[in-house]
Image (spheres, rainbow, N blue to C red):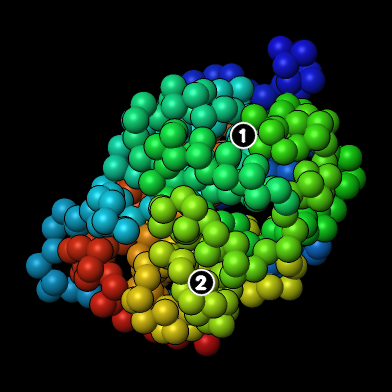
Amino acid sequence: EEEVNNGYDAPTNVNEVEVINTYELEEKAKKVVPKGGFDYMSGASGDEFTLKQNIEAWNAKGILPRVLADVEFPETNTSIIGQELKVPFIMSPIAAHGLAHQAKEAGTARGIAEFGGSIMSISAYSGASFDEIEAGLGGNNRWFQIYMSKDEEMNKNIIDEAKADGATAIILTADATLSGNRDRDDHNKFVYPFGMPIVSRYLKGGAKNMSLNNIYAQSKQKISMADVRFLKEYSDLPVFVKGIQTPEDAMAAIGAGAAGIWVSNHGGRQLDGAPGSFATLKAISEAVQNRVPIVFDSGIRRGEHIFKAIASGADIVGIGRPALYGLALGGWKGVKSVFEYFESDLKRVMQLAGTQTIEDIKHARLFDIK
Ligand code: PYR
């Protein structure tokens, strides 16, 4: 283990996790995850203004309680790009799950597979290989998030591998051509304690003992609409462009052939000073006008947040840090616990808001809080 993970001592326990709310998971994870890894996962850029805005932005809108709505046992099933889901939330792509737990991405994948009816997003910066992840995922649905190489042949190879692994969509992360200024990582002199097998073919050094900025420097740093076109044409898969925060960029992505828009500010980890992600959603969805579906992430911590995002034009949302904290606290069972929490919390909100279905949420009115 010393050799494999450079002495990085991630948790190994597998158990269900009690989730009263997901904020508390962060506090608990802090106690069991080594400091460098915890700070990397939980931290963000600059003053962490945007990280905080991702939570505060929810408070600009309220949900109207609706009664006499004849609702019982709300139904959370939905679909996106023709794929059936049990719940309107999936795993957001996150690098290096091995920082949270020694099961790495295989643990997250198994938690999602055992929960069922959701989607695992596999990060190009995964610390586990496709085969290791498949051992947990067991044939369940997966999307592949790409950080592109500067070398087009490498990109073709990686897409070929992702397709052979069974990816049903490609996620192009467009907001991370270099890293935000992560003060916590700089203080900790954070480097990944293990390699990244999927990108090791283009990454000299393989990621182990490398900082995020070293890795980004070897990845493609100049991203444009041509990259969206290339990914769409070469992969023949639906391409989501992730990191969209403005209507203009949403329209550019659609113009380049994106099959979906992924509204995100990368969990506040990139441009500090960016608005809370939810604050950008409504204008984007009004511009997109249902031409393509919208995935939303950055700040989902409660069922109310999922509801507000869907009522503001998102089709589904992505779960990020809370799932990683579940992984840290209980391996695959902890991830499953977190997904179950979001399912039951969303159902509670749906019931109290008088919405029987996800379609009903799309037609629910939010009100402005001033
Ligand atoms: C991040 O640390 O935010 C990456 O996307 C790798």
Q: Horizontally, is 243 left or right of 90 in the view?
A: right
Three-letter amino acid code of the residue under disc 2: Ala
Which residue, as the protein is rendered here, is positioned at the far left? Answer: 70
Query: Which residue is labeled 1 in the image?
Result: 198
Q: Quadrant of residue 264?
A: bottom right
Q: Position of residue 14 (x, y in %)?
A: 49, 21
User: Where is residue 298 shown, x and y percent of the image?
Assistant: 56, 60
Give the residue displayed 85% in from the left and 53% down from the top: 183
Query: Could you tell me if the residues under marks 2 and 1 are in contact, i.e. CB atoms within 8 Å?
Result: no
- Look at discs 2 and 1 and give the one toward the viewer: 2
Q: Residue at x 59, y 19 (%)?
A: 12
Q: Is residue 221 left or right of residue 227?
A: right
Left or right: residue 337 compared with residue 191? left
Q: Decide which of 227, 323 is in the foreground and name it.
A: 227
> Would you place residue 44 above or below residue 189 in this image?
below
- Dot label at residue 68: none
309 shown above or below 320 = below
Distance (Cα) linking label 2 and label 1: 26 Å
Residue at horizontal 64 percent and vertical 68 percent from the top: 224
Q: Tell me which label, 2 or 1, sits earlier in the chain.
A: 1
Corner quadrant of residue 313:
bottom left
> What residue is pinned by disc 2?
256
Q: Quadrant of residue 295?
A: bottom left
Please tell me which residue is depicted at 77% across the width and 55% down the height of the picture. Answer: 179
